[in-house]
Image (cartoon, grey):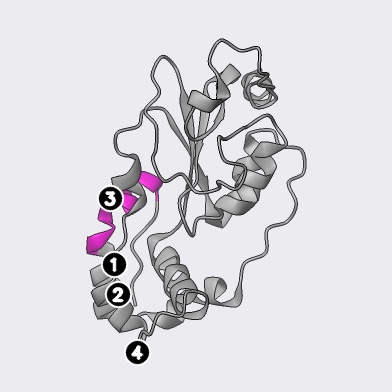
Amino acid sequence: MHRQCIRDSLRCVVTRGNEISLISMNGNICEKRRIAYVGLPRTGSRYTWCLLRRHGFVTVRADQVHTHAIPKYTDGWTYLVSCRNPYQRVVSMYTISKNVWKKDWKDFEQFVKKDPFPGIYDSTKHLQSIKWIHFESIVKDLGDLCFIEPHPFVESRSSKNWKEYYTPELEEIIYNRYKNDFIHCGYNRENF
């Protein structure tokens, strides 16, 4: 019965006749069922958002995937939050900054030591009622929300081989920097 309830909550349609105008809403939301999606960079958010849009989620900007300003809804709102193993997320952020944004990093070590970015916990600690969508089990987590057969999710080579980037020193820096992400999102510390 609980699965059916979650499934029904994701099949909602927001029409222009609602009491709250779509223009005044922020975030990627299903207002009728009080569900907000928080997609943070390098967490599989584009894949997840593509699926959520088919199930009644809307946003003010059609091109908005990442949630840059996370609204704080009350009165029974649930937040679906994309998360990712912090070690893997840092490697992903490094590869996109180097290969796509053309940042001139000497190597991964320089990136880790010079370019910290906000953690998942730091961006969402003010929220209540979070359902995590883990990058590593994205199809299962979305399936648990009763999405019928999500398309397979394909990881990049660097995403699969993220351990190759780490030394014990860099592992310790990342663990200490994103310790709250490990704790709150349910990830374990790795030994290198």
User: In the image, what residue type sits under mark 4?
Assistant: Lys
Q: Which mark is residue 112?
A: 2
- Left or right placement of residue 13 versus residue 81 in this view: right
Q: Which residue is mark 3?
A: 180
Distance, label 4 to label 1, CA atoms, is 18 Å
Q: How far across and how far down the image is residue 57, in percent?
A: 63, 32
Labels 3 and 2: the sequence-earlier one: 2
Position of the N terminus, as image quadrant, is: top right
Q: Is residue 98 above or below residue 50?
A: below
In the foreground, 31 or 181: 31
Q: Main secondary structure of the magenta part?
A: helix
Mark 1 Cα shell of 10 Å, populated few (<14), some (14-19), many (≥20): some
Q: Is residue 6 above or below residue 98?
A: above
Q: Which mark is residue 106?
A: 4
Distance, label 2 to label 4, CA atoms, is 11 Å
Residue 104 covered by magenta stretch: no
Q: How far across and how far down the image is residue 17, in percent?
A: 65, 12
Distance, label 3 to label 2, CA atoms, is 17 Å
Q: Which mark is residue 174?
A: 1
Q: Secondary structure at mark 2?
A: helix
Q: Secondary structure at mark 1?
A: helix
First to last magenta residue range: 176-186
- Find out whether the residues at labels 1 and 3 contact each other: C-beta distance under 8 Å: no
Q: Nearer the viewer, mark 2 or mark 4?
A: 4
Q: Secondary structure at mark 3?
A: helix
